[in-house]
Image (cartoon, rainbow, N blue to C red):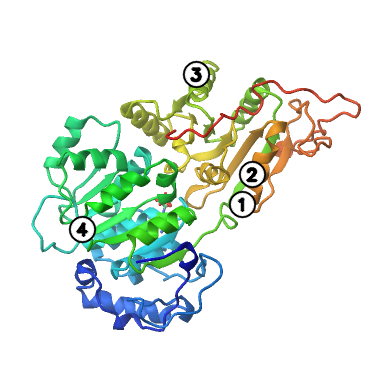
């Protein structure tokens, strides 16, 4: 495929799904069941005409849109998992997980992936994207492979170890009804001898971070010759973390006949170039936008004078009885450690999570969070994506993220699986540019709030008196008193690092 960012458009098709020809060996294999074909044809008939797509790129296409990416109607979705073309044991596992209705991204992506198409999907964490690629992967594995070998038939690449663990868990959850499906994860920080042993045992689904996978490939321990499906999860994050060369090196060594599913929060030019190099005639699916995200998350902002003020604000927020569990984001590993230690000494069930910790310690911390033994996780952006713990009622940006996109990922750790959540940010008066860029990105205004007794001494961003509404509905006065001199801010107000950490 040769697609430039400008060419990435929604491509409606008049071709009925029943006329489609397999385009690779996976496609043929995946479409082995006439039952599935019928379901897909039925599914395609139910779709709005403008969302149908060509199979081979040769069918009629609409005129290109000027927008590089066109969100599909989110109100259309097959009403049940039964309509997606999944094998009975997979449907049973989904029901056992308590899911009744496919999310928009699942409704759009699963049938297309089962049909063997490459996908370019713009979707956020929290949208159900993991199942959107894992269900078709399991569907593929529910059918016997014609090739012999012990190497994986499905490879999922993720940017972080945490996300890899979550994907591995999802494979086990949705695949529990299928016999003999072996999933392993190969991530950095894990001892090589353990990984070597796992790889010797044979694997169906390999979930990996790019750097360690490439190491293992280079030492000849992974046979990727029978790979049928490659998934790039959170591809934008992988590019941000500098994995582009690793991705290129990996894809150069895997079969060209594979099917590829690329998931990314946003489709920026870098992702469009990656898609052009890796995908063949992909179906483009966008079910979410920055504007529609996180409607169930209440967002507010507190102006903070300095580090001490932030700590007092945090203490107040943590005493809120509504707060079940919280992730507090800091900009550096060191401040995560220090703040976690400080909270611990003050009696909070708190711990740090960041990229300098050993994998075992990270796993134990996440396990404690999942089990509810930990109420406050103080983390760097390593936790901004991938952590899916439904008890997280609050996300607190102790330090603001430097990238607006990271803000969206951070606050997405709360309000999981349809619950409500609260996202609170602390900002120094000199950080208004960061707030503005977040507001521009999300096209939402973040309301400034004040906590009585903890009002900021500083004026508001606008230079006018800070007149935020009282937090938690309690009465409070604007912090600015006429005639009060404008205070200088200490060096720790804002706490922004000089540059964004590469691997948090
Ligand atoms: P993800 O976007 O993959 O991180 O998924 C977000 C959360 O939604 C996870 O807790 C999933 O278990 C949950 N989830 C995924 N699909 C569904 C569904 N169809 N119905 C209900 N919950 C779902």
Where does the N terminus fall, quadrant-wise? bottom left
**Residue at the disc numbered 4:** 255
**Residue at the disc numbered 3:** 341
Q: Which x, y percent locates residue 323?
A: 57, 35
Q: What SS does tag 2 mark? A: strand
In primary-sequence order, the first of circles 2 and 4 is 4
Say which of marks 2 and 4 sits in front: 4
Q: Residue at x 66, y 25 (%)?
A: 493
The correct choice, above or below, for 187 with respect to 91 in the image is above
Q: What SS does tag 1 mark? A: helix
**What mark, if any, has residue 442 been given in the picture?**
1
Say which of marks 4 and 1 sits in front: 4
Q: Residue at x 38, y 61 (%)?
A: 276
Q: Are marks 2 and 4 in contact (CB under 8 Å)?
A: no
In primary-sequence order, the first of circles 1 and 2 is 2
Disc 1 residue lies near ligand 1 with CB under 8 A: no
Disc 4 residue lies near ligand 1 with CB under 8 A: no
In primary-sequence order, the first of circles 4 and 1 is 4
Crowding at dot 2, Cα within 10 Å, few <14 / some 14-19 / many 20+, comes out as many
């Amino acid at each position: 495929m040769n697609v430039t960012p400008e060419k990435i458009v929604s491509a409606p098709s008049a071709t009925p799904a029943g006329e489609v020809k397999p385009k690779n060996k996976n496609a043929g294999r995946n479409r082995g069941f006439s039952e599935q074909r019928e379901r897909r044809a039925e599914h395609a008939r139910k779709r709005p005409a403008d969302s149908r797509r060509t199979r081979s790129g040769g069918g009629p296409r609409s005129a290109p849109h000027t927008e590089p990416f066109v969100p599909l109607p989110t109100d259309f979705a097959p009403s049940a998992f039964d309509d997606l073309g999944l094998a009975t044991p997979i449907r049973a596992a989904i029901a056992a997980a308590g899911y009744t209705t496919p999310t928009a991204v699942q409704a759009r992506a699963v049938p297309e992936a089962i049909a063997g198409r490459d996908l370019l999907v713009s979707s956020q964490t929290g949208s159900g994207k993991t199942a959107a690629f894992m269900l078709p992967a399991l569907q593929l594995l529910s059918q016997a492979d014609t090739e012999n070998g012990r190497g994986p038939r499905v490879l999922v690449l993720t940017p972080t170890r945490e996300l890899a663990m979550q994907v591995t868990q999802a494979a086990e959850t949705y695949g529990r009804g299928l016999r003999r499906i072996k999933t392993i994860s190969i991530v950095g920080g894990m001892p090589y001898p353990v990984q070597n042993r796992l790889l010797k045992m044979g694997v169906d689904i390999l979930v990996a971070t790019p750097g360690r996978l490439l190491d293992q490939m280079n030492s000849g321990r992974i046979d990727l010759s029978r790979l049928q499906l490659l998934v790039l999860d959170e591809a934008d994050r992988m590019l941000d973390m500098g994995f582009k060369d690793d991705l290129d090196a990996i894809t150069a060594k895997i079969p060209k006949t594979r099917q590829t599913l690329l998931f990314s929060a946003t489709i920026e030019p870098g992702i469009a170039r990656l898609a052009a190099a890796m995908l063949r005639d992909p179906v483009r699916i966008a079910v979410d936008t920055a504007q529609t995200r996180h409607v169930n998350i209440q967002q507010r902002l507190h102006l903070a004078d300095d580090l001490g003020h932030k700590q007092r604000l945090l203490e107040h927020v943590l005493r809120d009885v509504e707060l079940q569990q919280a992730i507090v984001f800091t900009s550096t590993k060191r401040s995560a450690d220090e703040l976690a230690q400080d909270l611990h000494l003050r009696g909070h069930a708190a711990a740090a999570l960041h990229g300098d910790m050993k994998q075992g310690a990270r796993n134990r911390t996440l396990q404690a969070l999942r089990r509810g033994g930990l109420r406050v996780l103080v983390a760097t952006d390593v936790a901004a994506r991938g952590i899916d713990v439904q008890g997280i009622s609050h996300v607190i940006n102790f330090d603001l993220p430097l990238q607006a996109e990271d803000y969206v990922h951070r606050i997405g750790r709360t309000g999981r699986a349809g619950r409500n959540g609260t996202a609170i940010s602390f900002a120094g008066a000199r950080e208004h540019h960061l707030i503005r860029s977040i507001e521009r990105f999300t096209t939402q205004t973040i309301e400034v709030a004040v906590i009585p007794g903890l009002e900021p001494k500083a004026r508001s961003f606008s230079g006018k008196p800070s007149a935020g509404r009282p937090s938690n509905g309690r009465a409070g006065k604007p912090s600015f008193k006429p005639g009060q001199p404008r205070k200088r801010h200490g060096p720790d107000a804002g706490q922004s690092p000089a540059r964004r950490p590469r691997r948090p």
